[in-house]
Image: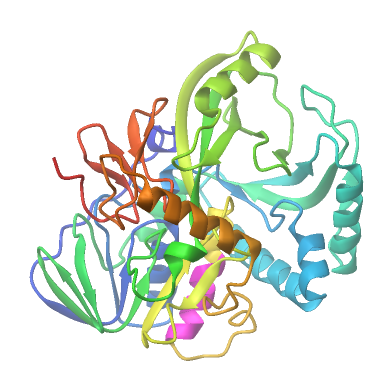
Amino acid sequence: MDSIWQETAHLPSFPPLDGDRSTDVLIIGGGMAGVLCAYFLKQAGVDCLLLEATELGGGVTQNTTAKLTAQHGLIYDKLLRRFGPNVPRLYWEANQAALDQYRSLCQGCEFQEQDNFVYSLDRRGALEREVRALQMLNVPAELAEDLPLPFPTAGAVRVPGQAQFHPLRFLAKIAQGLPIHTHTKVLELKPGEAVTHHGTVRAKKIIAATHFPLLNKHGGYFLKLYQHRSYVLALEGAAEFPGMYVDEAETGLSFRHYNGLLLLGGGGHRTGKKGGGWTELSAVARRYYPKAKIVARWAAQDCMPLDDLPYIGLYSPRTPGLYVATGFQKWGMTSSMAAALLLRELVQEKESPYAALFSPSRSMLRPQLLVNTLETLVHLLTPTRPRCPHMGCSLKYNRQEHSWDCPCHGSRFAQDGRLLDGPSTDDLKR
């Protein structure tokens, strides 16, 4: 179940923490967001330190499809109708700036310019509205017809000048020389202090870049977020075509090519719920690419916010000096860069035009809040075993991945009880 990125990259090794330390900024989490934070803070001359519980890039980053784009589904028309023109304009600017940073840093990381397409099977009107919204923002978007996909569509919104890359080769490049300690799990987080088995780190400011946030008692992230699984097959022998393609529907398919392989994504579902998974993708491959061979498969997990915008900034009003980056939805690579650029400014107490846009303290009054609350209540009250050590929800067995998954907040455990994905920080007790 290793991704093709794991099979084709060599990441540098770093030692565990050895004794107590002090630093100005502590970063917790060695995925793309955390390493980028360390990179930009070091470039700015800020004393910083990064702790990772396992290996660098060993979490969500290694399982991405590695698209770099500011076009995140049909989001701009939605933001325009909900908030007016300023919010979608800032969102485009923040993500386009992130893409430009990748472009400048990505030499040797298989960075390739690609047009990005968000297609729909039957919602032509939604595509037309999205094109109009993007054009209002002076984005060169257009409605595309005759797509090279193996099934009919209602068209797609095409945005040129987007990109794809090799995420782990990029991570290996920028991690060189950074103050990183791997295999150093944070056991307890206190104001200005992180406790590990290898020592305690005291810091003036802390960034939690752990995918799902660490603390339950602040910020309400257990209600503001849920997690979503998605699956990928790498197919050898499928016809190649240019561009990156994603269905606007949450349960649709995505397509991109890498080194002669077609990366077919889909089969998604809320973590802990039933979904198509690799069974669905295998059926799609047999139907549309009968001569292709499956050479790799893997799965990703994404944190989904209440209102389609990530949470980047102060963890909560009651936690001065503690910052967070989470809720990237399906766009973790671009959002990681946007988060790192914003947090670089915030921890240095500089102003940013994007601070209010991504503020974790913005309103929670969205329809998804009710859904998340009901899911949590139902599974807290379901009298089954095993239970998730995060908040005590019942776990559901994932037959495709042979894991125990939490429908409340997305923690996952192997059959032997070993922790696979947070927010839980502990293995299952026998």
Q: Give the side of residue 307 with respect to residue 154, left or right.
A: left
The N terminus lies in which quarter of the figure? top left
Q: Give the side of residue 192 with respect to residue 157, left or right.
A: left
Q: Which residues are magenta?
A: 338-347
- Where residue 27 sits in the image (x, y, percent)? 33, 71
Examine the structure image and report whether residue 302 is included in the region drawn in magenta.
no
Colour theme? rainbow
Extreme top residue here?
A: 291
Q: Give the side of residue 82 with respect to residue 394, left or right.
A: right
Residue, x 53% and y 64% (percent of image)?
337
Numbered disc total: 0
Say which of 422 and 149 sits in front. Answer: 422
Quadrant for residue 38, please give it: bottom left
Looking at the picture, does residue 39 appear above or below residue 405?
below
The answer to whether one can see residue 168 in this image is yes
- Where residue 359 sits in the image (x, y, percent)? 55, 78
Residue, x 64% and y 19% (percent of image)?
284
Looking at the picture, does residue 413 appear above or below residue 352?
above
**Magenta stretch, main secondary structure class:** helix
Looking at the picture, does residue 135 appear above or below residue 407?
below
Q: Give the side of residue 187 with respect to residue 240, left or right.
A: left
Examine the structure image and report whether residue 346 is included in the region drawn in magenta.
yes
Residue, x 60% and y 29% (percent of image)?
264
Residue, x 53% and y 70% (percent of image)?
311
The answer to whether one can see residue 106 in this image is no
The C terminus lies in which quarter of the figure? top left
- Where residue 108 sits in the image (x, y, percent)? 50, 48
Say which of 319 and 355 sits in front. Answer: 319
- Where residue 257 sits in the image (x, y, percent)? 63, 32
